[in-house]
Amino acid sequence: MSKLRIASILLIISTLLLKFSSMLRDLVIANYFGSSHEADAYLAAMIIPNTLILFMLTGMKEAFLPSYYKYNALGKGFSHLTNIVKGTFWISLAISIVGMAVSPFITPLVYPKAEAVDVAVWTAVIYFASVFLVGINAVYEGYFDAQKKFSFSTFSQTSVVLATIGGTILLHDRLGIYSAALGYFIGTVISFLIKLMYLKPGKFMDWKQPMDRKEVSAFYLIFLPVGLTIAVGQVNLLINTIFSSRLEEGVVANLNYAFRLVNIPQAIFGVTIATIIFPLLAQAKTSNDMELFKKGIEKGLSFMFLFVAPTVTGMVLLMKEIVQVFYQRGEFDATSTALTSEYAVYYVGSVLFYSIQAVIAKGFYTLEKGHYMLRIGIISIICNIIFNAILVKTMGATGLALSFSLVGFVYSAITFSTLYKLSGGFSLSYVAKEYGKVFVATAVMVVVLLLIKGFMLSWNVYVYVAVMMVIGAVVYFAVLFLTRSQSMRELVNIKQFKRKASEGR
């Protein structure tokens, strides 16, 4: 079995563990706190520091990998790692201190309700305290990705989520929802210690090496636009939270639960496929082979749609039952299930559009055109504010979910058309052909599921969802096989994919 296939399988497995552990975290919070003011305050308050956390985590991976490769080719990879770690230490420490200091002033702007504003403030303080170690963890996760140890990076993030779950379960009686925030903080410490023990202190960095300020500054000039671009989605979530926190109790929490649920396909398939094709795009850039670059984007878009399209379609058909399976227990009642299901359906469009964007983004970063993404991201933020203002008045909370999907469409459409022009154009006929086969297979799957759905409505909801998922998957892939989907065949044979990407379709 090839190293690429092994790495891909491990990445998919570790990503699945990360996303389902994240789902379990939300399930635990929903179980203990439901759609209460306390849950609203916690979820609203964590948005601001979480924007910075994702800015560091994801942005660092995108920026550090090519930077490390460049210095490593000169024999200075370890020295570069040391410089970035030391520089990030001071930057992250400053962000943590400033964030904790200003939390009492900025958090009420996001969550102004007096019922739980103190919960919001202290949640933000605890999360900002975590930013200090998150920054350092981010550098090493970028380093592990550069070493093609993708799964280790993902597993280290999983340890943070598991600590959040553990803290909530063990301490919710005594600390309330602060238990979740404290668990997250402990998780960042555990994640750091895992990396330190794995690398050993001597290979962690060169402790005696003076920090090269010019090298650190040069890196952050590259990192900032990349990180800001990555944070665009989180900024849009912040905007949605500001609007939703002005509505009735439970809206913030239920919108969050809905978004987290439908986001699973994007995080598993969209992000994973984008990560897998990144080395191929980097290879194309290094060899100045634009045809290979184009084929990499085309394959990435085809592979992504192959998995995302049937998944989100199936979720729409079974949304209420899926929400019931995941969330309905403890403090999360049938009313919360109905509202969360409704919001989730309106969020579905964003899954497809942001999955497309995840693949396209790799193309911009490979071509060192990340500033285009930042400009387009700013446009999407402006659109989100306008859409939110209009739709929240006409549709209420569901309008906020629909707004996110509309913004995703605008974002992906502009990024795709821009990269299309920059690269000289992709083979739209190839992509359309593969998308057409996926559409046919998905349509057949929907028809079959609708035909059998009425016969199983009286079944236990867990059995019903499981059986429908299995039948849907079997029908879908059977039709893909009959339509001779090239994307499916290439995914089964990674070596064939690599050869065809290099030699032409």
Image (tube, helix red, strand yellow):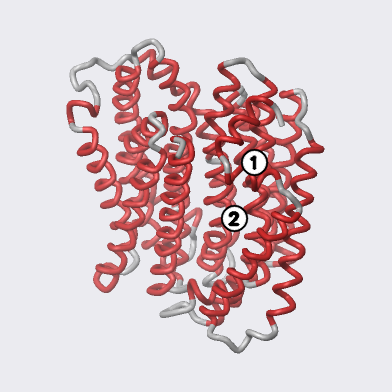
Is residue 49 rendered to the left or right of residue 226?
left
Which of pointers 1 and 2 indicates the residue nearer the eye?
1
Residue 240: give its label: 2
Image quadrant of residue 17?
bottom left
Residue that protrudes farthest toward the top in the picture: 74
Q: Which residue is mark 1?
A: 357
Q: Position of residue 434 (x, y in %)?
A: 75, 45
In the rendered image, is residue 400 in sight?
Answer: no
- Residue 145 numbered mark, or none: none
- How many residues crowd around disc 1 within 10 Å: few (fewer than 14), some, or many (20 or more)? many
Residue 50 in view (yes/no) = yes
Q: Quadrant of the N terminus?
A: top left
Q: Amino acid at mark 1?
A: Gln
Real-space CA distance between mark 1 and mark 2, rounded to the nearest whole angstrom: 20 Å
Residue located at (70% from left, 84% from top):
454
Relative placement, left or right, of 73 versus 421 is: left
As helix, strand or loop, the secondary structure at mark 2 comes to: helix
**Looking at the image, residue 177 lies above or below residue 388:** below
* Number of numbered discs overlaid on the protein picture: 2
Q: Amino acid at mark 2?
A: Asn
| Position of residue 307 measured from the top left corner of the image (x, y, whole percent) | 62, 53
Image quarter where the C terminus lies is top right
- Quarter of the rendering containing residue 177: bottom left
